[in-house]
Image (cartoon, rainbow, N blue to C red):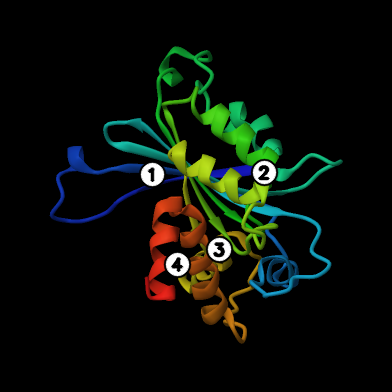
Amino acid sequence: MTGRAQTPVSGASVPARSRTIIVVRKQIVLLPQKKFIYHYKNLRWAKGRHETYLCFVVKRRMGPDSLSFDFGHLRNRNGCHVELLFLRYLGALCPGVWGNGEPGSRGLSYSITWFCSWSPCANCSITLSQFLSRMPNLRLRIFVARLYFCDMEDSREREGLRLLEKAGVQVTVMSYKDYYYCWQTFVDRKKSQFKAWEGLQQNSVRLSRKLNRILQPYEMDLRDAFKLLGL
Protein backbone atom coordinates (compact mmCIF):
# COMPACT_ATOMS: atom_id res chain seq x y z
CA MET A 1 0.00 0.00 0.00
CA THR A 2 1.15 3.52 -0.66
CA GLY A 3 0.19 6.99 0.44
CA ARG A 4 0.36 10.11 -1.66
CA ALA A 5 1.38 13.66 -0.91
CA GLN A 6 1.80 16.59 -3.25
CA THR A 7 4.55 19.00 -2.31
CA PRO A 8 5.32 22.05 -4.44
CA VAL A 9 8.87 23.29 -4.30
CA SER A 10 8.68 26.59 -2.45
CA GLY A 11 10.66 29.76 -2.95
CA ALA A 12 9.57 33.37 -2.78
CA SER A 13 11.68 34.40 -5.75
CA VAL A 14 10.40 31.63 -8.04
CA PRO A 15 7.42 32.49 -10.26
CA ALA A 16 4.39 30.25 -9.71
CA ARG A 17 4.47 28.91 -13.25
CA SER A 18 8.08 27.73 -12.79
CA ARG A 19 7.44 25.73 -9.65
CA THR A 20 7.77 21.97 -9.87
CA ILE A 21 5.06 19.76 -8.37
CA ILE A 22 6.51 16.61 -6.81
CA VAL A 23 4.12 13.72 -6.18
CA VAL A 24 5.52 11.27 -3.64
CA ARG A 25 3.96 7.87 -3.10
CA LYS A 26 5.67 6.29 -0.11
CA GLN A 27 5.36 2.81 1.31
CA ILE A 28 3.62 2.34 4.66
CA VAL A 29 5.47 -0.82 5.72
CA LEU A 30 9.12 -0.03 6.45
CA LEU A 31 12.00 -2.41 7.04
CA PRO A 32 12.81 -3.12 10.70
CA GLN A 33 16.20 -1.74 11.70
CA LYS A 34 17.72 -5.11 12.63
CA LYS A 35 16.52 -6.74 9.43
CA PHE A 36 18.02 -3.99 7.29
CA ILE A 37 21.39 -4.17 9.07
CA TYR A 38 21.45 -7.99 8.93
CA HIS A 39 20.70 -8.28 5.21
CA TYR A 40 22.58 -5.21 3.96
CA LYS A 41 25.72 -5.45 6.10
CA ASN A 42 28.64 -5.64 3.66
CA LEU A 43 30.54 -8.38 5.46
CA ARG A 44 33.39 -10.16 3.76
CA TRP A 45 31.77 -13.53 4.59
CA ALA A 46 27.99 -13.05 4.82
CA LYS A 47 26.94 -16.49 5.99
CA GLY A 48 23.28 -17.38 6.36
CA ARG A 49 21.98 -14.54 4.22
CA HIS A 50 20.07 -16.59 1.67
CA GLU A 51 17.48 -13.94 0.84
CA THR A 52 17.96 -10.88 -1.33
CA TYR A 53 16.27 -7.61 -0.39
CA LEU A 54 15.63 -4.91 -2.96
CA CYS A 55 14.71 -1.33 -2.04
CA PHE A 56 13.53 0.67 -5.02
CA VAL A 57 12.85 4.21 -6.17
CA VAL A 58 10.84 4.75 -9.35
CA LYS A 59 10.91 8.24 -10.83
CA ARG A 60 8.86 9.46 -13.76
CA ARG A 61 8.19 12.86 -15.25
CA MET A 62 4.46 13.46 -15.39
CA GLY A 63 4.76 16.73 -17.27
CA PRO A 64 7.09 19.67 -17.84
CA ASP A 65 6.62 20.83 -14.23
CA SER A 66 5.86 17.67 -12.27
CA LEU A 67 7.66 14.54 -11.09
CA SER A 68 6.37 11.35 -9.50
CA PHE A 69 8.29 9.15 -7.05
CA ASP A 70 7.42 5.66 -5.81
CA PHE A 71 9.31 3.96 -2.98
CA GLY A 72 9.16 0.41 -1.66
CA HIS A 73 11.02 -2.80 -0.97
CA LEU A 74 10.76 -6.46 -1.97
CA ARG A 75 12.44 -9.76 -1.13
CA ASN A 76 12.57 -13.22 -2.68
CA ARG A 77 9.17 -14.92 -2.69
CA ASN A 78 8.32 -18.60 -3.29
CA GLY A 79 11.55 -19.30 -5.14
CA CYS A 80 11.24 -16.23 -7.37
CA HIS A 81 14.34 -14.02 -7.28
CA VAL A 82 13.58 -10.48 -6.21
CA GLU A 83 14.83 -8.93 -9.47
CA LEU A 84 12.27 -10.91 -11.48
CA LEU A 85 9.62 -10.26 -8.85
CA PHE A 86 10.12 -6.53 -9.41
CA LEU A 87 9.42 -7.00 -13.12
CA ARG A 88 6.06 -8.55 -12.22
CA TYR A 89 5.09 -5.29 -10.52
CA LEU A 90 6.52 -3.08 -13.24
CA GLY A 91 3.21 -2.43 -14.95
CA ALA A 92 1.71 -1.05 -11.73
CA LEU A 93 4.78 1.01 -10.85
CA CYS A 94 5.37 2.32 -14.37
CA PRO A 95 2.02 2.92 -16.12
CA GLY A 96 2.40 2.86 -19.89
CA VAL A 97 5.81 1.17 -19.84
CA TRP A 98 4.42 -1.68 -21.92
CA GLY A 99 3.07 0.75 -24.51
CA ASN A 100 -0.53 0.51 -23.34
CA GLY A 101 -2.56 2.08 -20.54
CA GLU A 102 -4.08 5.54 -20.43
CA PRO A 103 -3.12 7.84 -23.32
CA GLY A 104 -1.37 10.26 -20.97
CA SER A 105 0.87 7.52 -19.60
CA ARG A 106 2.15 6.19 -22.93
CA GLY A 107 5.68 7.02 -23.96
CA LEU A 108 6.76 8.16 -20.51
CA SER A 109 10.39 7.70 -19.48
CA TYR A 110 11.23 6.07 -16.17
CA SER A 111 14.33 6.12 -14.03
CA ILE A 112 14.56 3.21 -11.57
CA THR A 113 17.09 2.81 -8.77
CA TRP A 114 17.62 -0.43 -6.84
CA PHE A 115 19.48 -0.93 -3.58
CA CYS A 116 20.11 -4.68 -3.36
CA SER A 117 21.61 -6.74 -0.55
CA TRP A 118 23.23 -9.01 -3.18
CA SER A 119 24.22 -8.38 -6.78
CA PRO A 120 22.06 -10.28 -9.34
CA CYS A 121 22.77 -13.90 -10.16
CA ALA A 122 23.77 -14.81 -13.72
CA ASN A 123 20.28 -15.83 -14.83
CA CYS A 124 18.69 -12.64 -13.47
CA SER A 125 21.37 -10.54 -15.16
CA ILE A 126 20.66 -12.22 -18.50
CA THR A 127 16.90 -11.74 -18.12
CA LEU A 128 17.30 -8.09 -17.12
CA SER A 129 19.68 -7.38 -20.01
CA GLN A 130 17.29 -8.90 -22.54
CA PHE A 131 14.33 -7.07 -21.02
CA LEU A 132 16.06 -3.67 -20.99
CA SER A 133 17.12 -4.06 -24.62
CA ARG A 134 13.39 -3.85 -25.47
CA MET A 135 12.70 -0.93 -23.13
CA PRO A 136 14.45 2.24 -24.38
CA ASN A 137 12.21 4.38 -22.14
CA LEU A 138 13.45 2.72 -18.94
CA ARG A 139 16.78 3.41 -17.22
CA LEU A 140 18.04 1.24 -14.35
CA ARG A 141 20.74 1.83 -11.72
CA ILE A 142 21.70 -0.89 -9.24
CA PHE A 143 23.53 -0.30 -5.96
CA VAL A 144 24.64 -3.53 -4.28
CA ALA A 145 25.78 -4.24 -0.72
CA ARG A 146 27.68 -7.43 -1.65
CA LEU A 147 28.77 -9.30 -4.78
CA TYR A 148 27.08 -12.67 -5.34
CA PHE A 149 29.38 -15.59 -6.32
CA CYS A 150 31.97 -13.33 -7.96
CA ASP A 151 35.13 -14.78 -6.39
CA MET A 152 35.99 -17.08 -9.32
CA GLU A 153 37.45 -15.37 -12.39
CA ASP A 154 35.31 -17.43 -14.77
CA SER A 155 32.06 -17.29 -12.79
CA ARG A 156 28.82 -16.79 -14.73
CA GLU A 157 27.85 -14.09 -12.24
CA ARG A 158 30.80 -11.96 -13.35
CA GLU A 159 29.79 -12.31 -16.99
CA GLY A 160 26.23 -11.43 -16.01
CA LEU A 161 27.38 -8.14 -14.48
CA ARG A 162 29.24 -7.35 -17.72
CA LEU A 163 26.04 -8.03 -19.67
CA LEU A 164 24.17 -5.57 -17.46
CA GLU A 165 26.79 -2.91 -18.08
CA LYS A 166 26.56 -3.48 -21.85
CA ALA A 167 22.79 -3.08 -21.55
CA GLY A 168 23.33 0.38 -20.04
CA VAL A 169 22.80 -0.54 -16.39
CA GLN A 170 24.98 1.34 -13.91
CA VAL A 171 26.08 -1.18 -11.25
CA THR A 172 27.76 0.32 -8.17
CA VAL A 173 28.77 -0.90 -4.72
CA MET A 174 26.92 0.85 -1.89
CA SER A 175 28.90 3.44 0.04
CA TYR A 176 28.17 5.09 3.39
CA LYS A 177 25.96 7.74 1.78
CA ASP A 178 23.89 5.04 0.06
CA TYR A 179 23.36 3.21 3.36
CA TYR A 180 22.41 6.50 4.98
CA TYR A 181 19.88 7.23 2.22
CA CYS A 182 18.33 3.77 2.58
CA TRP A 183 18.18 4.19 6.35
CA GLN A 184 16.34 7.49 5.99
CA THR A 185 14.02 6.25 3.25
CA PHE A 186 13.21 2.56 3.72
CA VAL A 187 13.85 1.77 7.40
CA ASP A 188 11.57 2.16 10.40
CA ARG A 189 14.29 4.14 12.14
CA LYS A 190 12.14 5.78 14.84
CA LYS A 191 14.24 8.96 14.59
CA SER A 192 17.45 7.03 15.31
CA GLN A 193 20.52 7.97 13.27
CA PHE A 194 22.33 5.54 11.02
CA LYS A 195 25.54 4.27 12.62
CA ALA A 196 28.20 2.73 10.41
CA TRP A 197 29.40 -0.68 11.54
CA GLU A 198 33.06 -1.53 11.84
CA GLY A 199 34.55 -2.18 8.41
CA LEU A 200 31.76 -0.58 6.36
CA GLN A 201 34.05 1.85 4.54
CA GLN A 202 36.91 -0.62 4.07
CA ASN A 203 34.63 -3.34 2.74
CA SER A 204 32.86 -0.88 0.44
CA VAL A 205 36.19 0.21 -1.06
CA ARG A 206 37.35 -3.41 -1.41
CA LEU A 207 34.14 -4.46 -3.15
CA SER A 208 34.20 -1.39 -5.41
CA ARG A 209 37.70 -2.25 -6.59
CA LYS A 210 36.63 -5.83 -7.17
CA LEU A 211 33.60 -4.74 -9.18
CA ASN A 212 35.74 -2.38 -11.26
CA ARG A 213 38.10 -5.24 -12.10
CA ILE A 214 35.13 -7.39 -13.12
CA LEU A 215 33.68 -4.72 -15.40
CA GLN A 216 36.98 -3.80 -17.03
CA PRO A 217 37.71 -5.24 -20.49
CA TYR A 218 39.96 -8.27 -20.48
CA GLU A 219 42.66 -6.26 -22.29
CA MET A 220 42.93 -3.90 -19.35
CA ASP A 221 43.23 -6.82 -16.94
CA LEU A 222 46.10 -8.23 -19.00
CA ARG A 223 47.93 -4.90 -19.03
CA ASP A 224 47.64 -4.68 -15.25
CA ALA A 225 48.96 -8.22 -14.95
CA PHE A 226 51.94 -7.43 -17.18
CA LYS A 227 52.72 -4.36 -15.10
CA LEU A 228 52.64 -6.40 -11.91
CA LEU A 229 55.04 -8.89 -13.50
CA GLY A 230 57.34 -6.11 -14.66
CA LEU A 231 56.87 -6.97 -18.36
Q: Residue at x 58, y 45 (%)?
A: 159
> Which numbered mark, 1 or 4, is in the foreground of this view?
4
Are the residues tagged 1 and 2 within 8 Å (C-beta)? no
Name the secondary structure under disc 3.
helix
Q: Which residue is mark 2?
A: 122
Are the residues tagged 3 and 4 within 8 Å (C-beta)? no
Looking at the picture, tell me which residue is in the foreground, 5 or 105.
Answer: 105
Residue 220: x and y in percent read 39, 57
Mark 1–mark 4 Cα distance, whole angstroms, equals 50 Å
Name the secondary structure under disc 1.
strand
The residue type indicated by label 1 comes to Ile
Mark 3–mark 4 Cα distance, whole angstroms, equals 37 Å
Q: Which residue is mark 4?
A: 225
Mark 4–mark 2 Cα distance, whole angstroms, equals 26 Å
> Which numbered mark, 1 or 2, is in the foreground of this view?
2
Q: Which mark is residue 64?
A: none
Q: Label 2 crowding class (10 Å Cα cut-off): few <14, some 14-19, many 20+?
A: many
Residue 211: x and y in percent read 52, 61
Name the secondary structure under disc 2.
helix
Are the residues tagged 3 and 1 within 8 Å (C-beta)? no
User: Which sits earlier in the primary sequence, circle 4 or circle 2?
Assistant: 2
The residue type indicated by label 4 comes to Ala
Q: Which mark is residue 22?
A: 1
> Which numbered mark, 3 or 1, is in the foreground of this view?
3
Residue 201: x and y in percent read 52, 79
Mark 1–mark 2 Cα distance, whole angstroms, equals 37 Å
Mark 3–mark 1 Cα distance, whole angstroms, equals 20 Å
Q: Which residue is mark 3?
A: 182
Most extreme residue toward the bottom is 198
